[in-house]
Image (tube, rainbow, N blue to C red):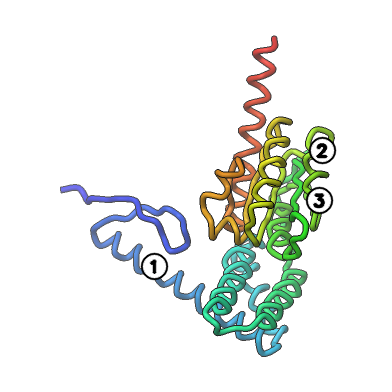
Amino acid sequence: MGEKSTWISTPEGEWAHKGTGVAGARGDASRRQRHSSRRRGVRKFVHAALVGEQADATAAAVRMAIQAQSRATVITDLFEAAQRFISERWQLGEATTDDEYRVSRTIAAAMSALPRFEGPRVQRPSKALLVTIAPEEHDLGLELVADAMQDDAWSVELWRSVDPTDLTDGSWWLDFDLLGVSSTYRSDRLGTQLKAVVRSWKAAGKPVLVGGLSFRRFPTLAEEVGADAIAPDARSAVVMAGRLLHERHRWSIHRSAKAI
């Protein structure tokens, strides 16, 4: 008889094929082992950050990058995971604001030491504008996304604490293919501002990708403001940005064909 199979969501949020026989069981065990190893790595990184062992934290990140031949993997599986870990500890009253700053500083220093890997070569890189909306001050996550996108041959600009009116007014003349917005805190005012920004950029034929803590805590927020997609981490941001760009090109070709 044939082996039954199904699809499951892994702890990393990805979809994997699962067999119900011996092969499937081995696959499950392997995935659990990898996930457990990643969690241990994240805890060790956070511990090194909290006790001031920057050299150890940086060395661990560099080793991971070399093994994976990818900075995006380190950004998602180590840096962003470390941010989530210390944030959860803070919410439980087990970490302080100073602890969060220590982890952020350690991540920034380790990021600057990561080796760069030759990515795909393109004649004209796609351009992305990544922003935080005033008075947002948390931008480390946005920097990590920018680095991951640059490794994927994007040309990226970072605008911090931007007046949303500037984004709305500039949607037609700003020379970017995609807008990415990161937000940590949710408010009615921000929701109204984001709706106007998204509406103007989509009217100009430019997709909007959103992410950050507020969108993770409130999954319906992205739909409420009209964003084209939401990215929970740097790896998925790269994937979603590529898909949105592809859809934009298809739409442009379709529109040109109709005009002819």
Q: What element carries label 1?
A: helix
Q: Where is residue 207 in the image (x, y as percent from the top left)?
A: 67, 38
Which dot marks residue 30? 1
Q: Is residue 140 left or right of residue 234?
A: right
Q: Where is residue 172 in the image (x, y as percent from the top left)?
A: 80, 33
**Of residues 77 and 196, the one drawn nearer to the viewer in this rendering:** 196
Name the amino acid type tagged 2: Asp
For the residues labelled 3 and 1, the Cα–Cα distance comes to 47 Å
**Of residues 90 and 142, the one drawn nearer to the viewer in this rendering:** 90
Where does label 3 land, which residue? 163
Name the amino acid type tagged 1: Ser
**Of residues 170 and 72, the one drawn nearer to the viewer in this rendering:** 170
Q: Is residue 133 above or below residue 51?
A: above
Q: In this view, does 180 lie above or below 176?
A: below
For the residues labelled 3 and 2, the Cα–Cα distance comes to 10 Å
Q: Residues within 10 Å of mark 2 (few under 14, many from 20)?
A: few
Query: Quick one: which residue is furthest to the top in this view?
Result: 260
Query: Is mark 3 in CB contact (under 8 Å) with mark 1?
Result: no
Kindly identify the residue that appears in the image at 52 percent across and 49 percent down. 220
Where does label 2 land, which residue? 169
Kindly identify the residue that appears in the image at 74 percent across and 61 percent down. 136
**Mark 3 or mark 2: whose residue is earlier in sequence:** 3
**Mark 3 or mark 1: whose residue is earlier in sequence:** 1
Q: How crowded is mark 3: few (under 14 residues within 10 Å), some or many (20 or more)?
A: some
Q: In this view, does 166 lie above or below 11?
A: above
Q: Position of residue 12 (x, y in %)?
A: 47, 62
